[in-house]
Image (spheres, rainbow, N blue to C red):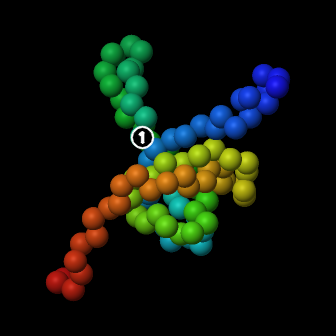
Amino acid sequence: MTESQGTRNQRRVITGVVSSDKMAKTITVTIEHTYKHPKYQKFVKKHTKVYAHDETEDAHEGDTVELIECRPMSKQKRWRLGRVVTRSVMPSGGDL
């Protein structure tokens, strides 16, 4: 087994919060990065929006999900849903 065959299935895994599930089999996930500013030494939050493939439409808005890197599925989709880590609490409707 060569070195390239061993690293083929080591895909990146990221965690984020679902910001939209209104598309068919696609979710929008917001990833938050925290890093230290090189000059001011303060911690800065940076947000990145990615599109992910959700075949079973299992994830909903507000859920924390784990995404796995995959081949490009469309112009913007480069990730697929691995698993739903935590579910969002749905408010009881009717009392508006």
Q: Is residue 17 above or below residue 1?
A: below
Q: Is residue 64 above or below residue 94?
A: above
Residue at the extreme top: 39
Task: From the viewer's side, name the closer residue of 51 and 59.
Answer: 59
- According to the image, label 1 marks what residue? 32
View extreme (left): residue? 95
Vertically, is 8 above or below 21? above
The one of 77 and 55 positioned closer to us in this rendering: 55
* Residue at 46% over, 44% down: 15
| Residue 6 can be seen, yes or no | yes
Residue 35: x and y in percent read 40, 25
Foreground of the two, 63 or 76:
63
Is any atom of residue 30 visible in this view? no
Q: How many marks?
A: 1
Instruction: Give the residue at x 70% y 38%.
Output: 9
**Where in the figure is residue 25, as x and y percent of width and height?**
60, 68
Residue that appears at 59% across and 46% down: 68
| Classed neighbour count for the residue bearing mark 1: other residues with Cα under 10 Å, few (<14), some (14–19), many (≥20) | few
Query: x%, y% of residue 89?
Result: 27, 65
Quadrant location of the N terminus in the rendered image: top right
Question: Can you say which quadrant of the picture contains the C terminus?
Answer: bottom left
Q: Is residue 70 left or right of residue 33?
A: right
Q: Position of residue 41 (x, y in %)?
A: 33, 16
Kindly identify the residue that appears in the image at 72 percent across and 56 percent down.
Answer: 73
Extreme front residue here?
Answer: 1
In the rendered image, the residue lying farthest to the bottom is 94
The type of residue carrying mark 1 is Glu
Which type of secondary structure does the marked residue at label 1 adopt? strand
